[in-house]
Structures are given as C-alpha cells and as structure tokens.
Image (cartoon, coloured by chain):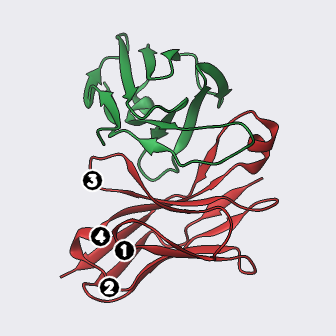
Chain colours: A green, B red
Amino acid sequence: ETGVTQTPRHLVMGMTNKKSLKCEQHLGHNAMYWYKQSAKKPLELMFVYNFKEQTENNSVPSRFSPECPNSSHLFLHLHTLQPEDSALYLCASSLRISGGADYEQYFGPGTRLTVT
Amino acid sequence: AQSVAQPEDQVNVAEGNPLTVKCTYSVSGNPYLFWYVQYPNRGLQFLLKYITGDNLVKGSYGFEAEFNKSQTSFHLKKPSALVSDSALYFCAVRDIGSIYGGATNKLIFGTGTLLAVQP
C-alpha cells in the first residue's frame, strides 16, 4: 500500500463543513481514479483522470469536486455533504499507454468518511 | 452493457481445502478480467488478470483463475485455503469500448464475495 497513499484515513464532518481528501501515488502512473465504496453496494467509479485531464465524471453530485494538479496527486474536495455520502473513498492509479495496452489499477487504503 | 456477477455473497471453506470464488461476466468482444482482494480497513489489492493467452492465470498468494469463454466465467481458485485468505474478493471487467475509444479506463466491479476460512 505504500505505492498509493491516502490522507486522512478517517474523517468525520458535519453537513456544512468543507474538507478535502488527498491521494498520492509513487508508482509513476499517469491515470488516477476516485471510487466510492458503500456497504452492500458495488464499488462505484466517481472520477477518472488521464494525464491530469478529467475523462470521466460518473454523474457525481457537484458537492464532490475533484482536482488533479499533476499525475502524482489527486484531491477530492467535499462541501455540504449528506449523511448518505458516508462511505469508504478509494483512490487508485494505473499506467496507461497508447495503443490500448492494459495495466491493472493499484488502490490506496481509503478514507473512511462519516457525515453527521 | 458490460457487467460482472458474483453469485455468492459468502463462501465458507475449511483450512487446507480447495476454494473457489465464482465470477461470471457479460461483455461485448474480448474481456479483460481482474480479481482483487480487500482485507478489513484496507484498499483493494490486485491478485491477477486475464487479457489473452493461457486460460489458466496464476497470481499472487497462490491464487489462480480459469477463464472459460463458453461459460463466460472467470472463477478464482486456490488448491489449499489458509485462514489468512479470509477477506472480501472482487471480480472486475474492463470496459473495452472505452479503451478503444481512448476515453477512460473504467473497471466494472462485482458486488464482492466474502471468503471465510475456518481453522
């Protein structure tokens, strides 16, 4: 798990707070992802960044705002969240090269978010 | 639409016995298939993948998976289970259309199977 790190590991926030989740990958990858993992639901892809450009927004509410300043860092800015947003938020990265070569995604340990 | 199904919420097996965690898929074209494992309070760890070639794929921690095109399955197996194998296992398929379109690297995950290995 040292390849992809996430901070904080646990976060409790009120519905009116603003907070940010941070992800950093040390693998030289060029694609990064945010996933949401809720109990008894499939893993949900939220955002995809390829070469720092957002290429996927999977109908995520605007109260979640991603930011990718460079290929190694990914943020998820949170504001006015709802209790149903409580979940484990996972960051992942992968190496993507032209021609469609396929490499697996590597995940961070996640941030356990509780919205009160 | 591409999808993956894990029909069992939980699999129980005694230590030392062989284990199988089932996965079936539905894709258009050739599938890219993956298995991941998640231990409590941890992220997902990559176990193995099938892209092309030999239908039997070997991965980490002694796990292997068999790709069966006629049955559209990609079951995870291990000859002898360990208590430390107890975890949540996810099967995933890559969205092939997105790859060829150059848009995204989407992975579509199953709902997960909890593997419990009893000593």
- How many neighbours does mark 4 have within 10 angstroms: few (below 14), some (14-19), or many (20 or more)? some
Distance from disc 3 to disc 1, alpha carbons, whole Å, reads: 20 Å
Residue B85 circle label: 4
Q: Is residue B83 left or right of residue B98?
A: left
Percent across and percent down for residue A112 are: 31, 35
Q: Are marks 4 and 1 in contact (CB under 8 Å)?
A: no
Q: Residue at x 35, y 13 (%)?
A: A19
Q: Which residue is mark 3?
A: B40
> Residue B6 sits in which quadrant?
bottom right
Q: Are marks 1 and 2 in contact (CB under 8 Å)?
A: yes
Q: Secondary structure at mark 2?
A: loop
Instruction: Provide the chain ID for the residue under circle 2.
Output: B
Q: Earlier in the sequence, mark 4 or mark 3?
A: 3
- On the question of residue A81 being in view, the answer is no
> Residue A109 sits in which quadrant?
top left
Distance from disc 2 to disc 4, alpha carbons, whole Å, reads: 10 Å
Question: Which of pointers 4 and 3 indicates the residue nearer the eye?
Answer: 4
Question: Which of pointers 4 and 1 indicates the residue nearer the eye?
Answer: 1
Q: Earlier in the sequence, mark 1 or mark 2?
A: 1
Percent across and percent down for residue A32 are: 52, 31
The amino acid beneath tag 4 is Asp
Q: Residue at x 75, y 50 (%)?
A: B96
Q: Are marks 2 and 4 in contact (CB under 8 Å)?
A: no
Q: Earlier in the sequence, mark 3 or mark 2?
A: 3
Q: Which residue is mark 2?
A: B80
Q: Are marks 3 and 1 in contact (CB under 8 Å)?
A: no
Q: Secondary structure at mark 1?
A: helix
Vertical arrangement, residue A64 with respect to residue B85, above or below: above
Question: Which of pointers 3 and 2 indicates the residue nearer the eye?
Answer: 2
